[in-house]
Amino acid sequence: MGTPAPEHGETFQRFREAVENEYAKARDVGHYARSLGYSPRTLTRATVAAAGVGAKEFIDRRVVLEARRLLAHGDHPVVSIASRLGFADASNFVKYYTKRTGATPTAFRRRVQGGGAAPLSRMFRGV
């Protein structure tokens, strides 16, 4: 793939920064293209050159990363996480997350937080 052209590198850096600041407000490439003064095609080309994935995939991966972080390291209800990530309702978030990860948010949380450790009720049974 090589090194991205300098203009792609700068475009991608601006896009990456915008995504980092706004991923909870906007998940569509058109929003970022308009706010940065590029076409969606230019953002996608720059993102593929720099990150190896399209612009939409880049945005989605950032949203999923934050969702996973919140699910794994907190006990906030899925509805709260959905709201924090800019989803109008939890069902849209669950569909979005499941489509991109292959697991529901609750299943992911259970797998990560369970981590194979026995629940306290089993650990102290008979004590």
Image (spheres, rainbow, N blue to C red):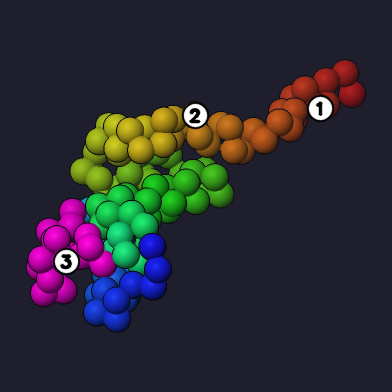
The local secondary structure at tag 2 comes to helix
Q: Position of residue 27 (x, y in %)?
A: 23, 53
Q: State the predominant SS element of the stretch in magenta.
A: helix
Relative to residue 102, is residue 27 depicted above or below?
Answer: below
Residue 41, picture quadrant: bottom left
Q: CA distance from mark 3 to mark 1?
A: 56 Å
Q: Which label number is shown at residue 42?
A: 3
Say whether disc 3 or disc 2 marks the residue closer to the N-terminus.
Answer: 3
Image coords of residue 127 (percent x, y): 89, 24
Residue that appears at 22% across and 60% down: 44
Instruction: Give the Cα distance between marks 1 and 2.
Output: 22 Å
Q: Which residue is mark 1?
A: 123
Left or right: 26, with 12 as reference point: left
Q: What amino acid is labelled 1 in the image?
A: Met
Asked if one can make out residue 100 in the rendered structure from this viewpoint, the answer is yes
- Look at discs 3 and 2 and give the one toward the viewer: 3
Q: Residue at 33% x, 44% y: name it.
A: 82
Q: Amino acid at mark 3?
A: Thr
Magenta range: 28-46
Q: Residues within 10 Å of mark 2 (few under 14, many from 20)?
A: few
Image position, residue 17 (x, y; %): 32, 72
Left or right of 114, for residue 34: left
Give the number of the disc on residue 111.
none
Answer with mark 3 or mark 1, whichever residue precedes in sequence. Answer: 3
Q: Which mark is residue 107?
A: 2
Residue 26 appears in view:
no
Amino acid on which disc 2 is placed = Ala
